[in-house]
């Protein structure tokens, strides 16, 4: 088996495992996606099947699409913006869905700033 396909399968399994644990929590889910240049976060209601609140580094007030936002500073901005928007919607508790990403770097920075903004998970 090629190394790339083995790593992809491990990442996919990790994502399934994390997502199933988070959905079992029965709370709204804070889902994170990161690319090399941007980071996105959204709070999802799995029961209703809809996104309640979202924020991303591609938004103009959080950095814009032309700027390279694939760093921790952008993740902190997105986490703070998401927490503020969640507070406006009356959301206080969520379950953190890191997906297939390990909890360090940009993912941890986003989670920490969301916690500082008032979200509990």
Image (cartoon, rainbow, N blue to C red):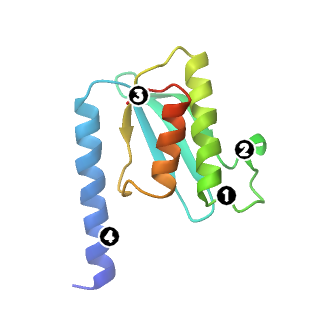
Q: Residues within 10 Å of mark 4 (few under 14, many from 20)?
A: few
The residue beneath circle 4 is 8
The residue beneath circle 1 is 69
Marks 4 and 2 close (CB-CB < 8 Å): no
**Image mark for residue 49:** 3
Look at 61% across and 61% down and name the residue there.
70
Q: Nearer the viewer, residue 120 or 19?
A: 120
**Image mark for residue 81:** none
Q: Give the CA distance from mark 3 to mark 4.
A: 27 Å
Disc 4 is placed on an element classified as helix
Q: Nearer the viewer, mark 3 or mark 1?
A: 1
Q: Residue furthest front?
A: 116
Give the image quarter of residue 86: top right
Residue 79: horizontal and vertical position, in percent? Answer: 57, 39
Disc 2 is placed on an element classified as helix
Q: Give the CA distance from mark 3 to mark 1.
A: 29 Å
Give the image quarter of residue 68: bottom right
Q: Give the CA distance from mark 2 to mark 3.
A: 26 Å
Please state if 22 lies on the left or on the right of 112 as rendered.
Answer: left
């Amino acid at each position: 088996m090629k190394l790339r396909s083995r790593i992809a399968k491990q990442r996919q399994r990790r994502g399934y495992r994390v997502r199933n644990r988070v959905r079992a929590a029965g709370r709204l889910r804070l889902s994170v996606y990161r690319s090399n240049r941007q980071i996105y976060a959204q709070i999802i209601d799995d029961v209703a099947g809809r996104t309640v609140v979202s924020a991303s580094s591609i938004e103009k007030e959080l950095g814009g699409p032309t700027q390279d936002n694939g760093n921790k500073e952008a993740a902190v901005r997105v986490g703070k913006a998401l927490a503020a928007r969640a507070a406006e919607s009356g959301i206080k508790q969520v379950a953190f869905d890191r997906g297939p990403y390990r909890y360090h770097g940009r993912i941890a920075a986003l989670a920490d700033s969301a916690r500082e903004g008032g979200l509990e998970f």
